[in-house]
Image (tube, helix red, strand yellow):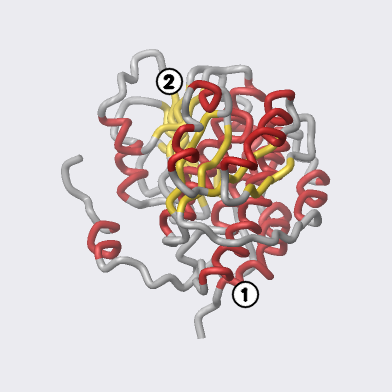
Amino acid sequence: MKPNMHDNFKLLEKRVLDSLEKTDLERIKYYLERIKTPTITTGVGGSSVASNYASKVLSSKNGIIAEHQEPRDMLYKPLKGYENVLACSYGGNNYGVQTSFANDLNKYLLSRNESQIEGVTNLNYDTSIENEDSFISLAATLMPMSIMLAYYNDNDISIIKEILESAREYNIDMDKVYEILTGFDTRTASIYLDSTLTEAGLASPVIHDKYSLCHGRTTLSYHHDNSLIHLNRNTELDRLYQEELPQYYNGVITLDGKYQDPIIDDFYLTYQAMLLSKKMAEATGRDLSRMAYSPAVKKLYRYKGQM
């Protein structure tokens, strides 16, 4: 019998810690710390979460310009001024990775597997546990994120262990639309929520930048019965929203940050977002690992034509 989401959540912490133990973190650190020029990170689906996080780590740790892009954007974005591309992909050889590498940039792959493309620097993470089999990526997203957080902390993984032991329970009443209140400091967590709510058919997400909400975007909830997910880092603006917004929403789910360091806190909030998505799936009778997905998924997933 194939594992369900409860099986995969039970293995989530073990998979992440096993990966950190089995992976040659010093080798990955050696290559990552040599990325000293503007860099694009790429990824799609669950790997877009890891890619966004990788861009933030490289920007903060290496002191460089680093930004996340979807693979197709690499065909249209002017690449002059960039020197590197780091693709994030659990499998390592999908069409998105091939598209990301169809250029003259220095190429890096953060993946469970090695690339077959010539000239790619492979940053492989390893595991002794069977590969995750899940429609919504859980460990497949959190493992590469943990590799990047380990690099950020000079391969000290104690904070990762602490975060994985900080599971929270969420009591929710499901709604059809969730407005997600976020910003650069919580972007990775919001990308996970946006991707998962959409791909699992749990609800329709609407992303708000926190300051943009001050400029008219509250009109949406005024005219529609929506709920809010607030990625809260306890700034003065966050506290204002906590006081003012509940009266305009059916319900407010607050994911509270825990760490002053925004790089660490975004990892923590992404983990909490995963736990929230599990509760939301349970509330709707869905299984994040074994989804009844649209028939279009299989055909579109294997597309390899002109983009």
Q: Position of residue 126 (x, y in %)?
A: 61, 56
Q: CA distance from mark 2 to mark 1?
A: 41 Å
Q: Residues within 10 Å of mark 2 (few under 14, many from 20)?
A: some
Can residue 89 be seen here? no
Foreground residue among 204 and 307: 204
- In the picture, the disc for residue 83 is 2
Q: Position of residue 194 (x, y in %)?
A: 48, 47
Can residue 258 be seen here? yes
- In the picture, the disc for residue 7 is 1
The amino acid at mark 2 is Glu
Q: Position of residue 102 (x, y in %)?
A: 29, 34
Q: Residues within 10 Å of mark 1 (few under 14, many from 20)?
A: few
At 74% from the left edge and 39% from the top edge, which residue is drawn? 257
- Residue lying farthest left? 306
> What is the secondary structure assignment of the residue under circle 2?
loop
Q: Nearer the viewer, mark 2 or mark 1?
A: 1
Nearer the N terminus, badge 2 or badge 1?
1
> What is the secondary structure assignment of the residue under circle 1?
helix
- Residue lying farthest bottom? 1
At 83% from the left edge and 46% from the top edge, which residue is drawn? 158
Q: Quadrant of residue 183?
A: top right
**Along the horizontal axis of the image, is 158 left or right of 66?**
right
